[in-house]
Amino acid sequence: MAIFRYKASIPGSKVFMREYEIKGDMTLYDLHEYLTADLDFAPDQMVLFRGLDSAGQVRSEYGLFDMGDGSMDSITVAQTVKAGEETLLYVFDIRKDRYITLAFIGTAEEHPRAHYPRLTAEKGRNPDQFAKGYDDLDQFADATDEIVEDSGVDEGELPEGEEFM
């Protein structure tokens, strides 16, 4: 199974960044549920994904209901990549058109012990879903702040080859 890597950012923020690895057969609805949990968003809000081509033009919109391009539960991540949608906008506040940009950055090898989707790197705090914008309290933070990366092995598991006999 193909593993797709995405870098998440918020327009205008130099602080917020996440990197995710996602199985290609995951639906956009399942990705929405994962992002909602990861970002501590309220699960009862209307959301949608916009698929953008390499020129940044909207090619598709995938909502909870089919808006003509397919519904989030019928479209997979792999289908968006195959359609040339190199960027997904996760619109988490439709009324204010606030979104997180998910830029496709490549593929990865599947780790047999990893659970997907998974967060592999993060910087900055989660955005407030209902604020007017992303509050960059850390905008003056030291530029050498570390990016936290995941080893891919769940806590309590031994690396491959180090199992108990």
Image (tube, grey):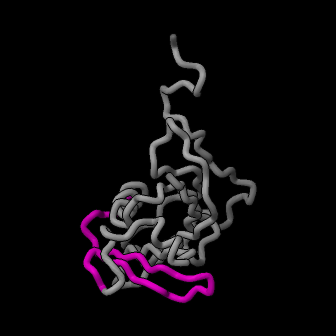
Give the overall secondary structure of the magenta segment. Answer: loop
Q: Is residue 15 above or below residue 110?
A: below
Which of these two is toward me, 50 or 53? 53
Taking the magenta stretch, the answer to whether it contains residue 49 is yes
Tell me if residue 78 is in the magenta stretch: no
Residue 137 spot, x, y in % from top left: 57, 65
Residues rendered magenta in the picture:
40-67
Q: Position of residue 57 (x, y in %)?
A: 54, 89
Q: Tell me what residue is drawn at x 61 percent, y 63 percent.
A: 138
- Work out whether 72 lies above or below 147: below
Q: Along the horizontal axis of the image, is 109 left or right of 143?
A: left
**Residue 114 or 89: which is nearer the viewer?**
114
Of residues 131 and 87, which is closer to you in this image?
Answer: 87
Q: Does residue 86 appear to the left or right of 92 in the view shown?
A: right
Instruction: Kindly give the residue lying farthest to the top in the view shown.
Output: 165
Which residue is painted at 68% across and 60% down in the image? 141
- Rendering coords of residue 50 (x, y %): 44, 80
- The answer to whether 137 appears left or right of 91 in the picture is right
Query: Which residue occupies 32% across, 86% down?
Result: 68
| Residue most extreme to the right | 144
Q: Quadrant of residue 27?
A: bottom left
